[in-house]
DNA sequence: GAATTATTTAACCGATTAGTTAATTGTAGT
DNA sequence: ACTACAATTAACTAATCGGTTAAATAATTC
């Protein structure tokens, strides 16, 4: 499981990490700030950050003793591209459901006493 | 990690499982057929299918001794929605990169002998 | 240079994962 | 009923994951 997409999906498969990304979407911030909303130790957050960094979703710079984190969205584009390939399927299914419901209505509207 | 999105991302974080989905995108097929391209045992594929089923990405019906599998794309829509929220970030970054490159060009074009 | 603050690394733990082989179930055909 | 085929379940293993606490590193300030 070394391919980029797997690494990215794997990084996203954790609510804490997605929450971190959501926070970073509002702007750069420190590890402390990132950790604050979570009920877990700082090292745990550092670990999550490492996972996100390995997936290329986060980068860290230096400012004095802080290491401000920043969102890197490029890998998300890859995810969007991948999932986009399947768009027609969920849309298609909705279309079919619509078709079916229309059919049903067409059949049943004329004599509504039928069960 | 019980939320739907985590389960879905986790299911997608494996190239074999994504390959299975890609195959199913071409139409319903049996477990044997699905397993055929992979260098792993049938039980391993069954396990992957279980993961995909738990994520709601695949359903199985019955036809004699076969259990044809079918793609269910609804959870992918959720993924698309989630990742869509970040679209502006990768687009924004590209814009900024473009800006930067334009700036650079504007600065450097006039006297190209500068290093 | 000693103390403080932010962050990471190390070492550990229990749970989960991805695979294996062997045994089991379910259905069809004879 | 017996055989064959499709698929699953069971039992096991090695590796990875998500968390912990304690120790180490880095930069700042006095």
Image (cartoon, coloured by chain):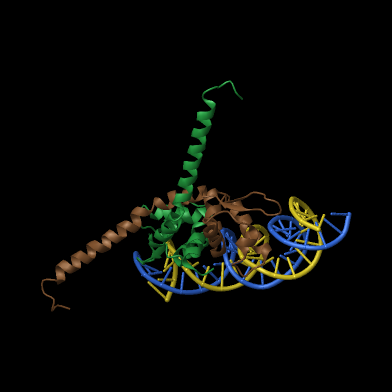
Chain colours: A brown, B green, C blue, D yellow
Residue that protrudes farthest toward the top in the picture = B113
> In the picture shown, does residue B102 fall above or below C22?
above
From the viewer's perspective, tell me whether residue D9 is left or right of residue A103.
right
Give the residue at x 43% y 54%: B84
From the viewer's perspective, tell me whether residue A51 is left or right of residue B18.
right
x, y percent for residue A91? 32, 57
Q: Nearer the viewer, residue A63 or C11?
A: A63
Give the residue at x 42% y 56%: B80
Label count reads 0
Quadrant in which the C terminus of chain A appears:
bottom left
Residue A99 in view, yes or no: yes
Give the residue at x 51% y 40%: B97
x, y percent for residue D14? 68, 60
x, y percent for residue B69? 39, 61
**Quadrant in the rendering for residue A42:** bottom right
Q: Nearer the viewer, residue A61 or B6?
A: A61
Q: Nearer the viewer, residue B44 or A95?
A: A95
Q: Nearer the viewer, residue C2 or A69?
A: C2
> In the picture shown, does residue B103 fall above or below A60?
above
Residue that protrudes farthest toward the left in the picture = A110
x, y percent for residue A72? 54, 49
Residue B66 in view, yes or no: no
């Amino acid at each position: 499981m070394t391919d980029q997409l797997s690494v990215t999906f794997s990084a996203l498969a954790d609510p804490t990490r997605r929450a971190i990304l959501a926070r970073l979407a509002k702007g750069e911030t420190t590890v402390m700030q990132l950790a604050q909303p979570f009920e877990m130790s700082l090292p745990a957050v550092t670990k999550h950050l490492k996972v996100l960094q390995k997936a290329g979703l986060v980068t860290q710079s230096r400012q004095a003793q802080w290491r401000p984190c920043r969102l890197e969205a490029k890998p998300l584009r890859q995810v969007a591209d991948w999932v986009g390939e399947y768009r027609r399927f969920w849309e298609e299914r909705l279309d079919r459901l619509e078709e079916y419901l229309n059919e049903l209505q067409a059949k049943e509207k004329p004599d509504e006493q039928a069960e």
